[in-house]
Structures are given as structure tokens and as C-alpha cells.
Amino acid sequence: MNFESLNKFLWFTGGLAAVALGTAGLFLPLLPTVPFLLLSLYCFSRSKPEWKEKIMQQPVIGKPLREYQQYKGIRLNVKIYTIAFLWASILASVIFLISILWVRILLIAIAITVSIHVLSFKTIK
């Protein structure tokens, strides 16, 4: 295996890992989805561009990624869904799963921070 093949293999592996983490982020409120998927696009563009195109053509995740790349923003309905799911998950965890006060406070602080971050993106129409 020469250096170029090893380099492409490492970029491809990083892309797969980023897709896995981004996919997990769809269901785990503290794991960001879009940054990992954007990272996967970068990794695949350096290793297997056809995989980048496959992700960009996915009906669920492709559209927000294309919009983010094109407009550097997020649609209002995506912001609402993201923040609603985040808070529902955090509040369910704080109410039903977590009994340690400092962990509860930490989760609420993280939710506030993530909400501010999501709202800081330009809203596209």
C-alpha cells in the first residue's frame, strides 16, 4: 500500500466515523449531527467523492447539508425541530433519569448553550 492509498483509506475511514457519529446525533441530543456530517463530506471529498455525492442526495440529511453549504444557514422548521427535540430529551433525562443535581444543572446549561448556538445561524427561507 503506497502513501496515497493509505491517505485515501484514512480519509475514507474518518468519513465513515463522522457519518456514524452524525447519524447517532440524530437520536442523541448532545451529539451534534450537522458538524459530523459536514466533516464526513470533507473526508469523502478527499477520498471517495462519489460517497460525498451519495450523502448530499440523501432525502433526510442531504437537503439540510446542501442548504447549509449553499446559504450558510438553517431553515426555521429545522431549528424548531432541533431545539424541541433537544429540550424534550434533556428534560426527560433531568426529570426521569438523572438524580444528581450538578449533572442536571450541567445538562440544562448544555441545552441552553446548544439552543443559543442553533439560533445563532442565519435562518433561510
Image (cartoon, helix red, strand yellow):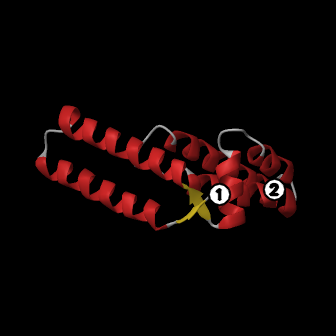
Instruction: Give the amino acid type for the residue marked by disc 1 in the picture.
Output: Leu
Q: Is residue 100 left or right of residue 107?
A: left
Label annotation for residue 2: none
Disc 2, SS: helix
Task: Give the labeled residue for mark 1.
Answer: 38
Instruction: Give the amino acid type for the residue marked by disc 2 in the picture.
Output: Ser
Please rate how many residues cluster around mark 2, counting C-alpha atoms within 10 Å: few if below 14, some from 14 to 19, many from 20.
Answer: many
Nearer the observer, 67 or 7: 67
Please rate how many residues cluster around mark 1, counting C-alpha atoms within 10 Å: few if below 14, some from 14 to 19, many from 20.
Answer: many
Nearer the observer, 47 or 50: 50
Q: CA distance from mark 1 to mark 2?
A: 14 Å
Q: Nearer the viewer, mark 1 or mark 2?
A: 1
Provide residue 66's location: percent of width, then percent of height: 72, 55
Vertical comparison of 107 with 88: above or below: below
Provide residue 77's location: percent of width, then percent of height: 52, 48
For residue 40, say whether it is visible: no
For residue 104, say whether it is visible: yes
Residue shown at the point (52%, 54%) measured from the top left: 76
Q: Is residue 101 left or right of residue 48?
A: left
Pointer 1 or 2: first along the chain: 1
Provide residue 1's location: percent of width, then percent of height: 86, 53
Q: Is residue 26 left or right of residue 62?
A: left
Task: Give the labeled residue for mark 2.
Answer: 47
Residue shown at the point (30%, 43%) measured from the top left: 90
Q: Quadrant of residue 69?
A: bottom right
Q: Is residue 118 left or right of residue 15?
A: left
